[in-house]
């Protein structure tokens, strides 16, 4: 089977800093891949390089055979990428409804039907449908951000640290939501919360100092405490 | 009256109370020329026309987050186009139509070229570059107008005759009022359209709009072309009102006046520009009338500087923003008994 998304040895600079120095990964249709690593390892930059927000200087990024390298973000995402950034990226001045509408590239019957099914996944958003996004709680904002990535017929969804800054009970809700749509989409999840990463992911990649160092089934990582301690700083009791 | 209120409410998608207030305001505006002198009639005509200039600037500054320091070139340029054509070809309605078409086409082309240069960067440096490039475009047009003395009379200003239909000040008031209503509806529809929503998203956070799949440069160009054409339409009406064009209309001060209208009234509200223009023009007129008391009042810009500082400090969202704030706190108090 051919990978849906393929990154080959990508290299990305932020100003004078060489952040990604050789990230390679493959994501196959229907799987959930988790990118793990310590703070500053380059996980978020990897996602930003895929969508062109932090353009890669060299390497190869292909989605379903389409070369993404050098494409501006608005063209890269239109090849079929839903991006959920760390800061949610929603527009506070718009209502929940308008935030979903602005994310739709076309307002046809199929997209509107998809929006309705996405709302079924997130009942909290349905209740706040006409409210300004500025009045939503952190968890609701995260759900709106994910819902927005799902309204178009995307090939892959990139989610950056969905549990960051949320209360444990809200993290559970976000995880439940991710599990609900996991089987219908291909996902790349950047996550620091190890439990969440293990419950959502099928495979993992570990990025260390801007390079992909390890990958494999998530169960392998879950079972290997030494690996967790070495790369992720996870200390088990 | 109830039927009319109903029509306004349905067509403009406003609440019945707002429709009633709009209806009453319209009645007052229709009556004003019948009970006022020529000075008041001309002042209000001026307010109606300059409000469009202010609203066109609000499309850029308030709805898209663009700082355009050369925006006056569309307004003043259209006034000159009308004046030159009336002088060279004749003050007829056909020539007015030709002036409108020429002003619209030229504004769209210049806005497009201006945008191609001005919208290259993003972030803070992009905003500064945009301000500087648009300022340069404005200065090029102003300097060209000063240099082409054969057509523009240079710094002396260009006086011209207008079609007979617009010579009556009383009727001109109504034309300006109709123009204001039509343009307000058109611009309101524009900012409420899906394109308008994207423009506001760009103002809020351009990067977010980009990763949602929007070519933000294209949308900013659309905003600049629409604002340029709206400004040009105001420039044509201004020519019909004043029958005079000078290079003052093309200066950065003229652009800053539009900015002042929107800031005083409330940026990003569209209607704020109407209120702001009214406030600024009436205040300017009142200050000039006080010249007899003391010479300082003829230097009305000093007072405007002070008003600007006070508005920015104490009413950052302008008169409309302050009204909304008062309304919200009143509602809150009512809710909590």
Image (cartoon, rainbow, N blue to C red):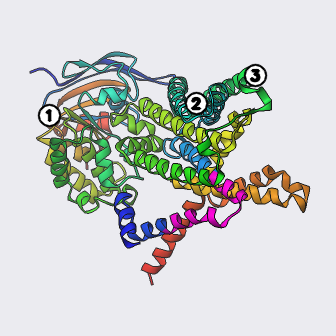
**Picture coordinates of residue B85, whole percent (x, y):** 62, 28
C-alpha gap between disc 3 and disc 2: 30 Å
Tag 3 and tag 2 share a subunit? yes
What type of secondary structure mainly makes up the magenta span?
A: helix
Helix, strand or loop at disc 2?
A: helix
Query: In the drawing, does residue A89 fall left or right of residue B187?
Result: left
- SS at badge 1: loop
Nearest the camera: B121 or B311? B311
Q: Which residue is mark 2?
A: B130
| Neighbour tally class for label 2: few under 14, some 14-19, many 20 plus, Cα within 10 Å | many
Q: Which residue is mark 1?
A: A31
**Number of the front mark, 1 or 3:** 3
Parent chain of label 2: B
Are tags 2 and 1 found on a single chain? no
- On the image, the x and y values in percent for residue B15 come to 39, 67
Residue B86: which quarter of the image? top right
Q: Are marks 1 and 3 on the same chain?
A: no
Q: Earlier in the sequence, mark 3 or mark 2?
A: 2
- Whole-angstrom CA distance, mark 1 to mark 3, is 72 Å
Query: What span is colored magenta in the figure?
Result: B24-45
């Amino acid at each position: 089977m051919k990978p849906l998304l393929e990154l080959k040895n990508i290299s990305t600079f932020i100003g004078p800093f060489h952040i990604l120095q050789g990230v390679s990964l493959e994501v196959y249709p229907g799987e959930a891949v988790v990118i793990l690593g310590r703070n500053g390892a380059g996980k978020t930059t990897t996602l930003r390089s895929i969508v062109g927000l932090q353009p890669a200087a060299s390497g190869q990024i292909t989605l379903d055979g389409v070369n993404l390298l050098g494409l501006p973000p608005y063209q890269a995402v239109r090849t079929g990428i839903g991006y959920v950034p760390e800061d949610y990226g929603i527009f506070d001045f718009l209502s929940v409804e308008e935030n979903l509408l602005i994310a739709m590239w076309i307002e046809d019957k199929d997209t509107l039907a998809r929006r309705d099914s996405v709302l079924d996944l997130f009942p909290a958003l349905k209740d706040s449908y006409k409210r300004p996004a500025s009045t939503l709680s952190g968890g609701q904002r995260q759900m709106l951000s994910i819902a927005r990535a799902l309204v178009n017929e995307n090939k892959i969804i990139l989610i950056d640290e969905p549990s960051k800054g949320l209360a444990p009970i809200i993290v559970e809700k976000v995880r439940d939501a991710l599990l609900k749509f996991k089987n219908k989409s291909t996902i790349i999840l950047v996550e620091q919360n190890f439990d969440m990463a293990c419950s959502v992911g099928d495979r993992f990649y570990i990025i260390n100092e801007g390079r992909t160092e390890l990958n494999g089934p998530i169960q392998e990582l879950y079972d290997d405490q030494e690996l967790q301690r070495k790369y992720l700083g996870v200390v088990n009791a | 009256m109830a039927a009319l209120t109903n029509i306004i409410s349905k067509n403009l998608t406003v609440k019945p109370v707002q429709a009633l207030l709009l209806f009453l305001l319209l009645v007052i505006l229709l009556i004003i020329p019948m009970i006022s002198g020529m000075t008041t009639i001309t002042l209000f005509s001026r307010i109606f026309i300059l409000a469009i200039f202010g609203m066109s600037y609000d499309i850029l500054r308030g709805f898209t987050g663009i700082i355009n320091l050369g925006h006056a070139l569309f307004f003043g340029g259209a006034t000159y186009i009308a004046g030159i054509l009336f002088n060279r070809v004749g003050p007829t309605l056909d020539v007015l139509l030709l002036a409108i078409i020429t002003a619209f086409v030229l504004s769209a082309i210049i806005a497009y070229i201006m945008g191609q240069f001005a919208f290259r960067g993003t972030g803070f440096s992009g905003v500064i570059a945009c301000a500087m490039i648009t300022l340069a475009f404005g200065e090029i047009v102003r300097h060209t107008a000063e240099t082409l003395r054969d057509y523009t009379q240079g710094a002396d200003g260009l006086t011209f005759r207008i079609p007979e239909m617009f010579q009556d000040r009383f009727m001109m008031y109504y034309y300006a009022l109709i123009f204001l209503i039509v343009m307000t509806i058109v611009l309101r529809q524009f900012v409420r359209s899906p394109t308008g929503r994207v423009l506001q998203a760009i103002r809020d956070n351009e990067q977010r709009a980009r990763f949602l799949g929007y070519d933000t440069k294209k949308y900013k160009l659309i905003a600049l072309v629409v604002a340029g054409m709206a400004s040009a339409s105001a420039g044509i009406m201004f020519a019909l009102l004043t029958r005079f064009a000078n290079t003052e209309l093309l200066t950065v001060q003229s652009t800053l006046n539009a900015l002042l209208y929107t800031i005083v009234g409330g940026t990003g509200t569209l209607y704020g520009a109407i209120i702001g223009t009214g406030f600024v023009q009436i205040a300017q007129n009142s200050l000039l009338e006080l010249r007899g008391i003391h010479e300082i009042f003829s230097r009305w810009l000093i007072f405007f500087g002070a008003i600007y500082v006070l508005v920015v400090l104490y009413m950052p969202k302008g008169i409309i923003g302050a009204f909304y704030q008062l309304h919200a706190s009143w509602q809150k108090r009512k809710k909590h008994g």
